């Protein structure tokens, strides 16, 4: 699943049945990436969230994360519309502008 910019973590958790951590500092995918890396991570960085989901930075600028690819834990069943472990899809409904 590829998501862009300011997608709220609560929506991602609900849609993908994940448990990505939500805090005051990180309520968006971009914010979570920066909180995990303690900086704006460069393209190609893979960060593991507390629930085991891996966030891969696909596109970034010097001051912001633009696009993130999520890799679900292999032991989690896929949710509706999710191709499952190793799969990747682009969901226009999950993109922010």
Image: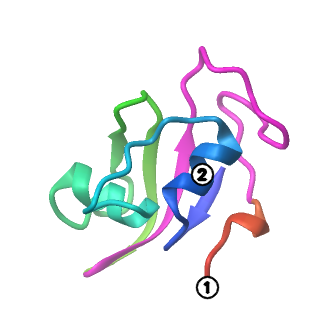
Start and end of the magenta stretch?
63-90
Find out whether residue 23 is within the magenta segment.
Answer: no
Residue extending furthest toward the bottom: 97
Q: Main secondary structure of the magenta part?
A: loop
Q: Which residue is mark 2?
A: 12
Which of the marked residues, 2 or 1, is nearer the chain's N terminus?
Answer: 2
Q: Counting other residues with Cα less than 10 Å from the Cα at mark 2, is it few (<14), some (14-19), or many (20 or more)?
A: some
Q: Tags 2 and 1 in contact by the CB under 8 Å rule?
A: no
Instruction: Return the x and y of residue 83 as percentages of the image width and height.
Output: 79, 36
Q: Observer-nearest residue: 45 or 91?
A: 91
The image quadrant that residue 3 belongs to is: bottom right
Mark 2 residue element = helix
Mark 1 residue element = loop
Compared with 31, 45 (above or below) is: above
The image quadrant that residue 92 belongs to is: bottom right
Compared with 79, 89 (above or below) is: below
Q: Quadrant of the C terminus?
A: bottom right
Find out whether residue 86 is within the magenta segment.
Answer: yes
Left or right of 58: which side holds 50? left
Residue drawn 74% across the image and 28% down it: 78
Instruction: Return the x and y of residue 74 as percentages of the image width and height.
Output: 59, 19
Residue extending furthest toward the front: 24
Residue drawn 35% across the image and 36% down it: 48
Residue extending furthest toward the right: 81
Residue drawn 67% across the image and 41% down it: 16
Q: Counting other residues with Cα less than 10 Å from the Cα at mark 1, is it few (<14), some (14-19), or many (20 or more)?
A: few
Residue drawn 66% across the image and 71% down it: 95
Q: Which residue is mark 1?
A: 97
Instruction: Return the x and y of residue 60 as percentages of the image width and height.
Output: 39, 72
């Amino acid at each position: 699943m590829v998501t862009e910019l300011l997608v709220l973590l609560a929506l991602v958790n609900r849609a993908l049945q994940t448990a990505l951590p939500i805090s005051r500092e990180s309520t968006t995918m971009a914010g979570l990436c920066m909180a995990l890396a303690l900086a704006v991570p460069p393209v190609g960085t893979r960060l593991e969230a507390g629930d085991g989901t891996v966030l891969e930075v696909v596109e970034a600028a010097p001051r912001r994360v633009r696009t993130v690819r999520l890799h679900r834990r292999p032991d989690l069943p896929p949710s509706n519309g999710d191709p499952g472990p190793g799969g990747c899809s682009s969901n226009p409904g999950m993109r922010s502008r």
